[in-house]
Image (spheres, coloured by chain):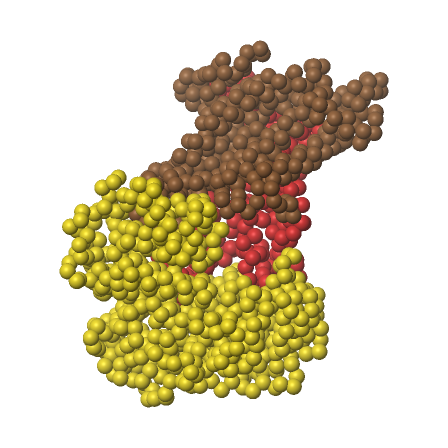
Amino acid sequence: MRFLRGGGIAGFVIRRVLLGLLVMLLVSIIVFVSTQLLGDPARAILGRDATPDRLAALQKQLNLDSSKVGQYFHWLGGLLSGDLGTSLASSQPVTSVLGARIANSAVLVVLAAVISVPISIAIGSYAALRREKVFDTVSSNLMLVLAALPEFVVAVLLVILLSTNVFHLLPAISPVPPGTHAWDYPDELVMPVATLVIAVAPYVSRIMRASMIEVLESDYVEMARLKGLPERTVLIRHALPNAIGPVFQVIAINLAYLAGGVVVIESVFNYPGIGLALVDAVNNHDIPVVQALAMLIAAVYVVLNLLADVATILVTPRLRTRL
Amino acid sequence: MSQTESAPALAEGVDVPTPSVRSTALLARSLRLWRTRIGAFLTLILVVIALAGPLLAPHASDDFIAKPFSSAAASGTVFGTDYLGYDVLSRFLYGGRSILLTALVATVIGVVLGVVIGLVAAYARNALDDILMRLMDVIMAFPQIMLALVAVSLVGAKNSVIILAIALTTAPRVARVARGAAQPVVERDFIGATEAMGVSRVRILFGELLPNILGPMMVEATLRLTYSIAVIAALAFLGLAANPDAANWGIMIQKNQVALASEPWGALLPILAIALLTMGTGLIGDGIARTAAGIDRERGDE
Amino acid sequence: MTTDQLPAGETETTGGGAAVTVRDLRISTTSGVEVVHDISFEIAPGEVLGVVGESGSGKTTVGLSLLGHARRGLKIAGGTILLGDRDIRAMSDADLRRLRGSLVSYVPQDPASSLNPALRIGIQLREVLEAHGSTDDKENAARIAEMMREVALPDDPAYLKRYPHQLSGGQQQRVGLAMAFANRPRLIVLDEPTTGLDVTTQSTVLTTVRELAQIHDVAALYVTHDLAVVAAVATRVAVMYAGRIVELGPADKLFESSGHPYTRRLVGAIPRLTGGRSLVGIPGHAPSPGKRPAGCAFGPRCRLHVPECDEKVPDMVPLGPDHSSRCIRAHEVVDFKQDDYGDPVALPEPQAEKPVLTIENVVGYYGSTEVLHSINLTLEQGEILAVVGESGSGKTTTARAISGLHHSWTGSIRLGEMELAKSARARSTDIRRQIQYIFQNPYGSLNPRKTIGESVGQPLSVFKVASGKKADAMVGEMLEQVSLSAAYARRYPDQCSGGERQRVAIARALIAKPSILICDEITSALDVSVQAAIVELLGELQRELGLSMVFVTHNLPLVRSIAQKVAVLADGSIVEYGETAKILANPQQEYTRHLISDTPSLEVATGEVASGAGVADGERPE
């Protein structure tokens, strides 16, 4: 990165994409090595008392009879051409097994993001403005507590609160039947989305608060006030654009975290997304599915970080003009 | 500093030697904050329950008491029986130890590894820095829970596997923070002073740099402990434990969840325990962070 | 809001009166500790009042109060601030907002951090017009162009599209000035606007301030720690100490016949271009708020202290028209001749035959950029060589190359006969011991997590000189030698003042008995009185120990008091090199002449000619 410069924003994006591809390549090696080379997948699948015949047949199906490097490139080639292999559990192509699952999880993650990001930016900013006043104290402590709670704990507490013991408002589980869409069951989406929002909001609002406080104490905000600018202008034009920069990275990391967080939450609510698919695949030793999901979740992380870097550059002239 | 009048003129205090706080005293000083005290209190209680629980349990963890999900009155126990017909209270008292110890060991390994990598990267300031941090990026592309899941599915749900998976995914996150904290310190002149003296690199890393980032690292360690507890409990909750019917808070939540409406204690007790434990460590971390920030502000040398 | 301007009637000054009148102003922390006490002064239209004080004296706090602003944790607790005849303290928040940037404007200390990094400078200039009612784009554009020309910056649209970081420090500060003068204010508060700027830039900024204030009949409050700058810009001066004005009077009076011992000592601590005199620092330090004594706050440090000083805070004693001093012995003080600074320095003769350090054809690089062009210097035994230059001249790079902290250079640096390796790590332990380096910023050069004793003792163990009890004893001795007590060994850096820390850094450099000491701007982060004390100490140590020293600085007058030889650096090349007295009295190069004439100095203010003649000796106050 340091020795490749120039080309303005386009150049930066290209370099960043290339770097992302490099990271994905390394990710693919790690995924392949850990799933295919640590131990014998065929034996892991069939268990200890497998007959040699079935073992050999499965090894052939998994393409385990060629060289390790050959296997890797075969797998990578398939990955690049959209052929993710065949699920061992269902004997269906991985793409068709996961298609609907991915859509379901995407609904959860996107909804959670769309709700939590603006709310937490608003809460963080307002807490910074009302620093050490009631709103700040209450929201900061609440966020601190929520941040500490594991998401499955939050999920189960929500179930207890909203659908079993206290109130009976919402369904305790969200089993979207195959062939239907997640958004056809809005009431089933409430609790999973709420859990994800609670998982993300504390982090984003806390960094937003910290960033905003730092900016509000900066010389240029003091100067803007001493220039006699209306407070609205001071906040919206001078403070906010500078405060939002560091927040993008945290949003990206948290949304990427959501992609992993759905694993547990989908299990709690029995929601048929990639998380549940991963748990099932792991339990069934369905290696092609595990590989595909690992690559997918890693790709989400890489893409989100890329977007955050670009967004940060765009709102920070000091970085932008140096490209 | 002489040319700048720092905001509140009080902060200057050239002739008021502020009670100097070293990182060793940081924890003690942070205990002056109520949040740290509450956090320490919660953590202490839960640690005692987790570690000493088995000694206090009225029954063995696999004593059949009454039919599954019997009420307290029906089974003659405090909290009723669980999905196997065992005593909920005893299962609860037995169920924290392994989670806590596994989380602690994994966190310590991960934090130590991460601090070393972060310090080396921050001090190197060259291609090594780039390479190390890119590698960390690659590992971070795997969410902790996913990597642990995959590892467990491949090798089996052994404690050592879980510890390694958590430590390995904790390290890059800690490394990032350690590097971030160390970078401004590396630029300060006292590092140059020791370099000019010819002090060895290892000594500069651990004798000069490390003490200056202990504050943020203590915060990070408590935060990571909180996450490790969550991930390990979640793994058990997902049914990936060495023994799927062991006395374990995560498993208890999963298996007793079905009776939440009728006999909630089997799931509720471990839920509350995990919630209070992670809240406790979270509060301690925040308390240390506030204290460290307060000290930095008081010292006013930045 | 187009009706943003104040009603015409209210903007009228009361016939010929002061632009601003401050009476009994008190500022305290929100918890009630008073930090600024009983400030009273007035400024006439077109007049520049200088407020001088060292760090913590409350000068910035006073400056900001004229805009009705107090920083976080502080509040204006009492007194009146009249702008014309309107009391700022009685104004509503909305009125205050309309006042700021239009009738009273502010020029901040650090332009780099005071301009919004995310906004183009054109926008930042325009908004100050828009916020005060000028909404016509065309008019505003014309006004901005005019402002830019007034502060000698380009007025083309491309320049206005720049971001602050694309401007140099001097340009940023001129944008700040343009902004401050934009709405033709009645009063302008300048808070150390030239701190951190090179002398050349500083001189143009000062000229601009003076001229604009005069042309537009603007009253100005110029806050600074630098007496010489005040001499260049202000007609009247208020000297602040521990939250009070201790002396107020015309600039020339203050420097020639000041009526307060503190002012006298401050003047004595200032290095002068003419006459190499040793500097005399002020021992001790100013008391912080809440710890100020019931009597005169300067009492504990004052040579003229008598028991009555401690009874109550002295009143201002009038000494002449417009001149008063807060000292019960003011009438005695004012009659003393201004000679409170040291004797002419007798710098020791260096032994010329054997250079301890030889620098030959050194070319330095940053990456692939050449930043030093063929540097040649020699340092004799017992000599102090000053390396002077503005920022970016390569003076620090030269110093770092000698000590092995900057590795990227070619050429030859020899210690005695010994060729030096490029990086400190590649050098032998003994060479590392012989060359010691002292850093600019004493706040950064000591590890905050180590005790003073550990820091000072570190060279002993690294160079394997001593250990255990013996090392502890040596640390104690060394601390005494730099005028600290051995008890400091147990303290941490945050328990020491800036001056004390720099003494500790000197102790650490000297404990291993080096043959060469390299001082990199070691006084630039310190107050003048502390700077004087440090220079005093270095001079003593040098005479005592026969040290050879490379003294890097941007402060030309300081060189006069300490160095036998001087090398003037510009853009990585040596412009002039030779005996200090000769070069300063009779510079051969245009660059050196400019550097000397741009350096603000008391001599200019007090009308002394720059002919090298010192001030006549007279009777000492004691």
The answer to which of B46 and A253 lies nearer the viewer is A253
The answer to which of C37 and B63 lies nearer the viewer is C37
Q: Colour of chain A?
A: brown
The residue at 48%/19% (across/down) is: A189
For the colour red, the matching chain is B
Instruction: From this view, report whether residue B291 is shown above or below residue A136.
Output: below
Instruction: From this view, report whether residue C157 is shown above or below residue A38.
Output: below
Residue A132, horizontal then vertical, whole percent: 35, 44
Looking at the figure, which quarter contains the C terminus of chain C?
bottom left
Whether residue A105 appears in this view of the structure is: yes
Instruction: From this view, report whether residue A29 is shown above or below residue B202.
Output: above
Whether residue C387 appears in this view of the structure is: no
Residue C322 located left or right of residue B292: left
For the colour yellow, the matching chain is C
Residue B84, horizontal then vertical, whole percent: 58, 20
The number of discs equals 0
The residue at 83%/25% (across/down) is: A65
The residue at 18%/49% (across/down) is: C8
Residue C13 located left or right of residue A179: left
Looking at the figure, which quarter contains the N terminus of chain C?
top left
